[in-house]
């Protein structure tokens, strides 16, 4: 496979391109690793970005005033807790697995589809269609 992350430099400007069109540039573990390497190399610029610029560059997804951080963290944790416990567990498992530099086992790709057989998935679809809040049970 060709390099999944391309870095082109033009003087002081660098352009990072995701290069996996066969997979619609989906970020798999290999691409995350290459992207992290590219970003580390580019971060040597050593400039500290102000929050509005970091937001504009999509390095962060929100800016919160110092006096609102605790409330925002609590609100974020509440949103996570209100979601499906199975999904939160799977996301944590998948993120932890991305940290392991080894080939996927034969069964690991299939794990991402097990959610579709869960009661919580059915509850989420049903609530969406009825335009109600889902009640997740973790099953």
Image (tube, rainbow, N blue to C red):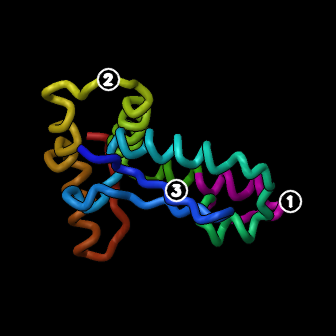
- Under circle 1, the secondary element is helix
- Under circle 3, the secondary element is helix
Residues tagged 2 and 1 counted as in contact (Cβ below 8 A): no
- Under circle 2, the secondary element is loop
User: Nearest the camera: 46 or 93?
Assistant: 46
- Give residue 65's position: percent from left, percent from top: 81, 64
User: Nearest the camera: 111 or 67?
Assistant: 111
User: Would you say residue 129 is visible in this rendering?
Assistant: yes
User: Disc number at residue 67?
Assistant: 1
Residue lying at 31% horizontally and 59% vertically, measured from the top left:
25
What stretch of residues is rendered in magenta? 60-76
Is residue 115 located in the magenta-colored stretch of the structure?
no
Single out the mark in the foreground, 2 or 1.
Answer: 2
Q: Residue furthest front?
A: 11
Residue lying at 34% horizontally and 49% vertically, measured from the top left:
4
**How many C-alpha atoms fall within 10 Å of the one at disc 3: few (<14), some, or many (≥20)?**
few
Is residue 64 located in the magenta-colored stretch of the structure?
yes
Residues tagged 1 and 3 counted as in contact (Cβ below 8 A): no
Q: Is residue 94 left or right of residue 72?
A: left
Residue lying at 61% horizontally and 59% vertically, measured from the top left:
59
The answer to whether residue 46 is above or below residue 9 is: above
Q: Quadrant of the N terminus?
A: top left
Single out the mark in the foreground, 3 or 2.
Answer: 2
- Write down the residue under mark 2: 102
User: Disc number at residue 79?
Assistant: 3
Q: Is residue 113 left or right of residue 97?
A: left
Q: Quadrant of residue 127?
A: bottom left
Sequence-first disc among 3 and 2: 3
Single out the mark in the foreground, 1 or 3.
Answer: 1
- Give residue 34's position: percent from left, percent from top: 44, 42
């Amino acid at each position: 496979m060709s390099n999944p992350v391309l870095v082109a430099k033009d003087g002081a400007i660098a352009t990072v391109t995701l290069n996996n069109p066969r997979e619609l540039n989906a970020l798999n573990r290999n691409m995350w690793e290459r992207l992290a390497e590219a970003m580390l190399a580019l971060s040597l610029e050593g400039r500290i970005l102000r929050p509005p610029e970091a937001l504009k560059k999509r390095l962060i997804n929100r800016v919160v005033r110092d006096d609102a951080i605790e409330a925002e963290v609590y609100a974020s944790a509440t949103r996570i807790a209100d979601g499906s416990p199975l999904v939160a567990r799977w996301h944590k498992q998948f993120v932890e697995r991305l940290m392991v530099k080894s080939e996927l086992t034969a069964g690991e790709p299939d794990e991402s589809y097990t959610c579709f057989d869960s009661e919580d998935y059915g509850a989420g679809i049903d609530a969406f269609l009825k335009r109600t809040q889902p009640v997740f049970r973790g099953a």
